[in-house]
Image (cartoon, helix red, strand yellow):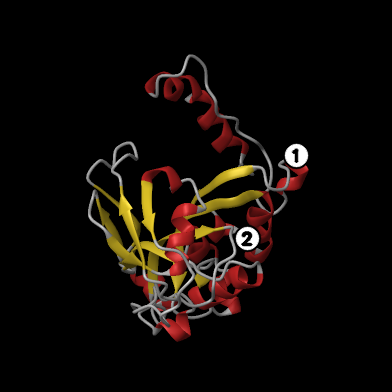
Amino acid sequence: VDMTPEQLEVADRHRDWHASRFGYQQSNVEFLYGHIEDLASLGIADNSIDVVVSNCVINLSPVKAKVMAEIFRVLKPGGELYFSDVFADRRIPAALRKDPVLLGECLGGAMYWEDFRRILHDLGCLDVRTVKQNPITLDDSEVAAKIGMVKFRSVTVRAFKMPLEDRCEDYGQVATYLGTIPEHPHAFDLDDHHHFETGRPLRVCGNSTDMLVGSRYAPHFKIWGDKSTHFGLFDCTPGPQGESAAAGGSCC
């Protein structure tokens, strides 16, 4: 889905090349002209999509809460939002959010992490995972003069449409990756602190277990244990912005 005809034309021009590259007789990809804030107008039904992927596009929307609501409307139960975007350590001042240079640099539209977390929380997604993140340096002196007080990060996020607890709880569960995801024979990273080495059991919280067994990853993991016995909070790590688990809302 894209609102720019020129982008869609480029994508459509390379459709056959990609089909051939991945071994398809014909393309299984459809490009739609429209707005990500209104997927219903494109005929994308409720609970119909397995995975939503975005690369620094949500950043450009002026109504990000609407985008997220649409994404979680169309995702199937157990479906996944997997995207990369620019996040800020504070809310961007209104005047800077309209600055054309900053918007073009994907800085003016950067989301404050805690506002993003709250949006997903209101949609029922209580545990958002960071897959990886990198600081963004402001090398342009003009840009730095305008917005150098803000710290930016490029963050890859994984979020699931499923009922999860708002804290990571310990039920004594263990997960083992089977090494069966294509191109990941030796290990798989659920997020930035769940590195599953093939064949090696790893203690996981209840939310991580639910993510693995209730999503597209279910065939690739073996799980031991259930939720019949509770051992308290799971031993958590800091959230994506270096804050405590209690402040960040996702600890595991």
Residue at 46% of width from left, 19% of height from top? 24
Q: CA distance from mark 2 to mark 1?
A: 17 Å
Q: Which mark is residue 231?
A: none
Question: Dot 2: few (<14), some (14–19), or many (≥20) neighbours within 10 Å?
Answer: some
Towards the viewer: 107 or 144: 107
In the drawing, does residue 75 fall left or right of residue 117? right
Identity of the amino acid at label 1? Gly
The answer to which image quadrant residue 34 occupies is top right
22 vs 52: above or below: above
Q: Which residue is mark 1?
A: 43
Residue at 50% of width from left, 69% of height from top? 127
18 vs 94: above or below: above
Q: Which residue is mark 2?
A: 68
Q: Position of residue 234 (x, y in %)?
A: 38, 78
Residue at 35% of width from left, 80% of height from top? 242
Numbered disc 1: secondary structure: loop
Q: Position of residue 35 (x, y in %)?
A: 68, 48
